[in-house]
């Protein structure tokens, strides 16, 4: 029997940094599953984040899924939320949608 290996942790895009008048879309705030303190969030600093979404037309390899990659940069507050920067800014439709936080690169 093969044991399944967990490669990512689920999270949700909560918001962008900034305020109502000036939103900084280059930095997203993520809430990760089972991360409730600032100390718990430290483990995820530097980890890769993938926002996976579906498109209408398949690419040259036949896949209808695409991803925007980013990196967890720091904690946001004391409740376990983290900030992350993405290669390209996330679209507005990403708010409230799931992301995957990969468990690599590892510092263990």
Image: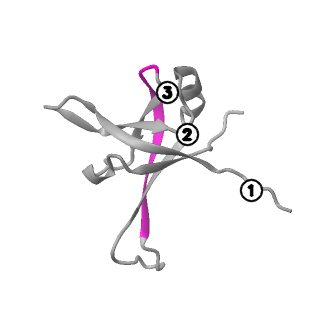
> Residue at image x 55%, y 40%?
47
* Place of residue 25 in the rendered image (x, y in percent of width and height, measured from the top left): 27, 40
Q: Which residue is mark 1?
A: 4
Q: Is disc 1 placed on a helix, strand or loop? A: loop
Residue 80 has which mark? 3
Q: Is disc 3 placed on a helix, strand or loop? A: loop
Relative to 61, does residue 73 appear above or below in the rendering?
above
Q: Quadrant of the N terminus?
A: bottom right
- Spatial CA distance of label 2 from label 3 is 15 Å
> Residue at image x 62%, y 44%?
103
Relative to 76, does residue 57 appear above or below in the rendering?
below
Start and end of the magenta stretch? 65-78
- Main SS, magenta region, reads strand
> Residue at image x 25%, y 50%?
92
Say left or right for 49 vs 53.
right
Closest to the camera, between mark 1 and mark 2, is 1
* Place of residue 79 in the rendered image (x, y in percent of width and height, measured from the top left): 46, 24
Q: Which residue is mark 2?
A: 47
In front here: 106 or 23? 23
In front here: 48 or 80? 80
**Sooner in the amino-acid sequence: mark 2 or mark 3:** 2
């Amino acid at each position: 029997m093969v044991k399944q290996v967990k490669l990512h942790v689920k999270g949700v895009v909560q918001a962008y940094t900034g305020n109502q008048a000036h939103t900084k879309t280059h930095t997203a705030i993520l809430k990760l599953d089972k991360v409730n303190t600032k100390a718990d969030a430290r483990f995820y600093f530097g980890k890769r984040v993938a926002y996976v979404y579906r498109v209408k037309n398949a690419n040259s390899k036949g896949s209808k899924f695409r991803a925007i990659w980013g990196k967890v940069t720091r904690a946001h507050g004391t409740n376990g939320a983290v900030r992350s920067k993405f290669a390209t800014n996330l679209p507005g439709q990403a708010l409230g949608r799931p992301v995957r936080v990969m468990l690599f690169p590892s510092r263990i």
